Structures are given as structure tokens and as C-alpha cells.
Image (cartoon, grey):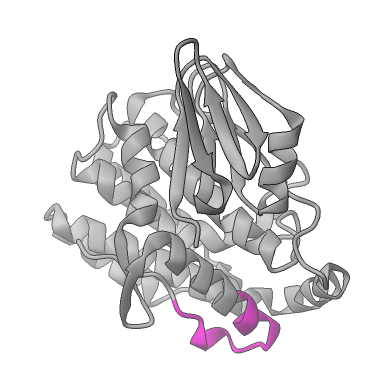
Amino acid sequence: MSFRNVIVNERCKLEYSLNYLICKKRLDETRILIDEIKLVIINSTQVSITTSLISMLSKNKIKLIFCDERHNPECELVPYQNNYYSYRKIKDQIKFIENKGNFWKRIVEEKIYNQARNLKIINCIDEYEMLEEYKNNVLEGDSSNREGHSAKVYFNAIFGKGFSRDSDNVTNKYLNYGYSIILSSINREIKFLGYLTELGIHHIGESNPFNFSCDLMEPIRPLIDSYVIKKMVNEDNYKTIFIDMLASEVIFNNQKILLDNAIHLYIMNAVSCIKDNDIENIKFIEYEL
């Protein structure tokens, strides 16, 4: 069973030989068994990587993420050979978009619920009660935009009234990095099941290759927020903290399991419920505050 998250931070050459990822530096060489790897993050633009290694990572469905010069995730490897029944799955996906109204209602309710919990731990009781009211009044398809109203109240309460998610500041840098790690894990699971990340239900951006992933990650965003709220991240550790987060314990279906495994089960459950129009039985990832 794969369990290693490999992060490459400095100049080196990555290559493949005899089922090993080999990292070569000037005076040293590290070998990691391919079967043990779950995720590879190239966190430097000074890394070279062979096509044979890229091919082998793809064949083993190992997520490969490339970062830009600012060390932010830029792109990722998405294998073609994900599922033997991809054509059938894609046809199913086109059909189950018809269930989008109730699906998005449940997603928004869960997201607001988790946001409200974050507000409660920092004693923003008035805002907490406001989000509880919003959560109880979400309409089908969130036609009254309770998500947008909640987001404004939520971020203003946590980071101040001058805060904007569009601003170029250190808080957004932390949030965006954490969100990108979750998004990559969800992309992997959707592709593994044979569905299209591009074909979303609520997110329908023509230039967004991860619309469906963005739909499904919304209730997990407050987990990332909680790390920033509790000041668990800083300039020196935020990348490591959010990558290690995938190996932290959460609750899914009343059981404590690792977040990365919970994401796998959550995506399987969500897709099954959407397909069967059984939206009320979608199970969500819970986290302890």
C-alpha cells in the first residue's frame, strides 16, 4: 500500500530504474520504491525529471504536482488510463448533472456548517448564529446565494472587514496552497473512478479543468481555514503542514481514518449518491476542532 509523500525542494535529477524513483544530487543518491509512493511534489523549478519516471508514476496512478518559481502548485499529471469503463462513466456523469439542484444544496449546507464551527471556536458567537440561520435556509441550487452571504460574514469575522479572497497577501497564500493540496487529492480520486474533473455541477467555468473537483471540495475548505485560524501555519512551515495534513486523522462515516483515505471514500460515496439521486445520504468528512 502506498504511503509516502515525496517532496523535492532543491536542484536534483529524478529518474526511474528497477521500480525505484531515484533522486540524484551532486554527492548523493536516494532511492524510493515506487510501490510506496502516493504523491510526488516538485517544489523547485531547478529539478529535472526523466520521461521514463513520469510514465511510471502515471502507470501507478501516483499524483505528480509541479510548483512554480514561488513554490505554489502550478499543474499536475493526470493519467489517461484511469478506469476501464471511462466512456460509460462519462455518459453517466452527463446524466446525473440533472440532480444538481439538491446536490448543491447539500454541499452548501455542509460548507456553511463547517464554517460556523470555525467561528464558534474563536468566539464569534453572533456570526456563528447568523451562519446557522443561513444553513437552515439554503434553497435548492442555493438560489438565494446563502453560500456567498455566509462567506462574506465568515471571512470578515475571521480576518477582518478589509479582507478579500482576491487580495495578494500572506493569508490567501496559505489558504490557496492548502486548497490546492485538497483539490489535487480530489482530482486523483475522480479520475481514478473514470469521471471527468472538467464536467462540474455548480462550477461550470469554461477555462477551469477541475469544475467537478471544485464542487466536491467545498465542504472541506473550512478544514484548511481552521489551520490558518488557529495559527498553525507560518512562512516557514505552511507547505509541510498542509502536505502532512493528508495523513492527519478525520472522521468519516463515524470512523477515524486518515484524511487522504477519507477523501477517497467521500468521493466514492458522493458520486454514487448523485448518480442514484440519493442526495440526502451523502456522507461528509468531519474534523475535530
Image height of 81 relative to 173, above or below:
below
The number of callouts visible is 0
Image height of 21 relative to 141, above or below:
above
Tell which residue pokes out farthest to the front in this image. 18
Q: Position of residue 175 (x, y in %)?
A: 39, 39
202 on left or right of 246 = right
Residue positioned 62% across, 56% down in the render: 188
Residue 78 in sight here: no
Q: Position of residue 138 (x, y in %)?
A: 47, 73
Chain part drawn in magenta: 271-283
Q: Depth check: give the residue in front, 129 or 167.
A: 167
Residue positioned 41% across, 42% down in the render: 178
Q: Position of residue 85 (x, y in %)?
A: 83, 73
Q: Is residue 281 located in the magenta-colored stretch of the structure? A: yes
Q: Quadrant of the C terminus?
A: bottom left
Quadrant in the rendering for residue 142: bottom right
33 on left or right of 15 = left
Q: Depth check: give the residue in front, 13 or 147.
A: 13
Q: Is residue 21 located in the magenta-colored stretch of the structure? A: no
Q: Depth check: give the residue in front, 176 or 75.
A: 75
Q: Position of residue 172 (x, y in %)?
A: 40, 33
Image height of 110 relative to 82, above or below:
below
Q: Depth check: give the residue in front, 152 or 111.
A: 111
Residue positioned 38% across, 82% down in the render: 253
